[in-house]
Image (cartoon, helix red, strand yellow):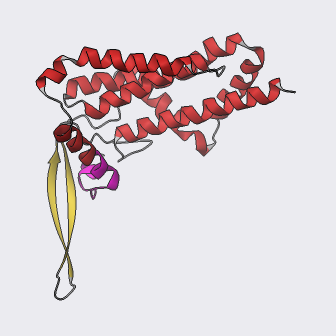
Amino acid sequence: MIDNLQSNIISANLMWHIVHKVDRKFHEDWSSKARNDADCLVITVYRDKAEKSAEINEMTHAAREVLLDARLALDMLQTETDPDRWRVHWAGGVALLRAVGHVLLNVDQRANVELAKIGDEAHRRWRSADPSHAVYRDFILEERNNILKEYRSKVHPLAEVPMAIRLTLVNPETGEVSYLDQIADFDENLFRPLVEGYGEGEDARDVFEEAINWWERELAAIDKELSIRLRR
């Protein structure tokens, strides 16, 4: 699987991660002093999180609290350059993604009988063969089980990933098109693709964000359905 990845042509999402990383690296103040002041940054993030949470009036508020932390974990994964720390952030982030469903079931649903019915219906729907919920079955559940039960992951194991890049060259006089293939090594976790299963070949952070967005849509749908039923 990894060998196949090495032969892939660089994709648009990889270029996004490169630009994203370079922009952060050279245009933000990530000096050693800023890193030493990381605690202040975390405190600010959690203060913002608390303010956002105060605005949440949905009955799925407990699950949404976990989802906010999953979003914070994604932010950490986007900027972390150390491979060992990245692995720990990934494990924690994946556990949070799965915890959203557990907290919905064990906290939010226990607080409201009608919400419990809607939540149970949703859980059955998510585990069905419906392709619109594949990210839940094939990524959130599987990757969580991989990490918590076997401590393995579908993410490329190395922080440095060799990739094949094809450059398109156009002769300005004749218009003739030619191609130049070369291998480039992307380090500092610039590209951490999934090597099998759901999202294979995609950067793991993109699939992680897809999972977050899926949860947000599903929780919003549950709250909407509850609101409709309570008005009857």
| Image quarter of residue 177 | bottom left
Query: Which residue shows up at 38% across the image and 42% down it?
Result: 196
Query: Which residue shows up at 43% across the image and 25% down it?
Result: 70
Q: Position of residue 41 (x, y in %)?
A: 29, 20
Quadrant placement of the C terminus: top right
Residue 226 visible to the viewer: yes
Q: Position of residue 118 (x, y in %)?
A: 73, 25
Residue 192, compared with residue 100, is above or below; it is below
Query: Which residue shows up at 13% across the image and 21% down it?
Result: 33
Query: Is 47 placed left or right of 57 in the picture?
Result: left
In terms of depth relative to the viewer, which is nearer, 71 or 158?
71
Residue 104, compared with residue 180, is above or below; it is above
In terms of depth relative to the viewer, which is nearer, 230 or 152?
230
In the image, is residue 5 part of the stretch drawn in magenta? yes
| Image quarter of residue 206 | top left
Q: Position of residue 53 (x, y in %)?
A: 52, 19
Q: Which residues are magenta?
A: 3-17
Q: Position of residue 48 (x, y in %)?
A: 42, 21
Chief secondary structure of the magenta portion: helix
The tally of labels here is 0
